[in-house]
Image (spheres, grey):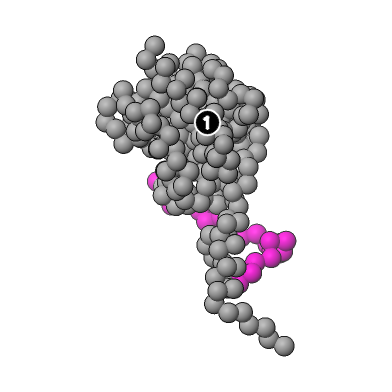
Amino acid sequence: METQIDYWEAHALLEWQIELGAAEAISETPVNRYEIPEKAPKPAAAAPGAPQAFVPEKTEDASEIALKLAQSAGSLEALREALEGFELCDLKRGARNVVFSDGNPKARVMIVGEAPGRDEDIKGKPFVGREGQLLDKMFAAIGLDRTSPDSEHALYITNPIPWRPPENRDPSPAEIAMLKPFLIRHIELADPDVIVLMGNWACTALLGRAGITRLRGQWQKVLGKPAMPMMHPTYLLRTPLAKREAWADLLDIQAKLKS
């Protein structure tokens, strides 16, 4: 017997799937990924004079290749191009856009967030949506704005993971390690006075430690620069009482900039 659902039930089911990360339909028919074709198709021969695809040496792993690409970048534009051309991270295959940065690259304060979510993946910028709105309000309270052309009052924002993990899962340690050279080079090229480690994954990538509730509010060093771990806006939206601690951290950042 065929079962039908009404409009609002169907609408609720679709919203639930979007929350889980199923934001778009890939195909109208299911694909059995366990089926192995009898014969794999032969790759087409490249046309004479066509550029050759990059094939890494067998002795090099993805992290070594990422390190070489990152170190060869002499500007933020070159670093973005190197990251966009990096094909060895599986996350890239399931993402719409690379989420490289937002804000003023000459800012004194650089925020390192976590992995992009659905909104960030669609727009290609870090910290958009509700989390981004809260982030902007937090730093506006100490006179900082990602849209400011003045480096004294500007923000520059990036993520340790530039592509959205499927279904918004946590990035793996292997993915963080693979992409870390790009993050390190990003910080070197931007050369901020203060770094804000926004959440656990920023701390994991740059400090090698997690546990943001213990780390927050305590100045650390990243590439010789003062770094402040802070609660991620996602956590603050779920736990409003933690905004008091975030405010204390913001005041510490303001004092560090004045000193």
* Viewer-proximal residue among 101 and 128: 128
* Viewer-proximal residue among 108 and 62: 108
Quadrant in which residue 203 is drawn: top right
Q: Is residue 124 above or below residue 30?
A: above
Q: Position of residue 242 (x, y in %)?
A: 56, 34
Residue 45 on the magenta segment: yes
Judged left or right of residue 8, residue 79 is left
SS class, disc 1: helix
Q: Position of residue 113 (x, y in %)?
A: 51, 35
Q: Decide if residue 215 is in sight here.
A: yes
Q: Decide if residue 234 is in sight here.
A: no
Q: Position of residue 227 (x, y in %)?
A: 50, 20
Residue density around tag 1, few if under 14, some if 14–19, many if 20 or more, within 10 Å: few
Tag 1 residue:
244
Q: Quadrant of the C terminus?
A: top left
Which residue is the extreme one toward the top? 259
* Viewer-proximal residue among 236 and 212: 236
* Viewer-proximal residue among 135 and 68: 135
Q: Position of residue 144 (x, y in %)?
A: 35, 29
Which residue is the extreme one toward the left? 149
Q: Quadrant of the N terminus?
A: bottom right
Q: Is residue 252 above or below residue 236?
A: above
Amino acid at pointer 1: Arg
Span highlighted in magenta in the image: 29-49
Residue 104 on the magenta segment: no
Q: Is the stretch drawn in magenta largely helix, strand or loop?
A: loop
Quadrant in which residue 231 is drawn: top right
For image coordinates 29% across by 32% down, the residue present is 148
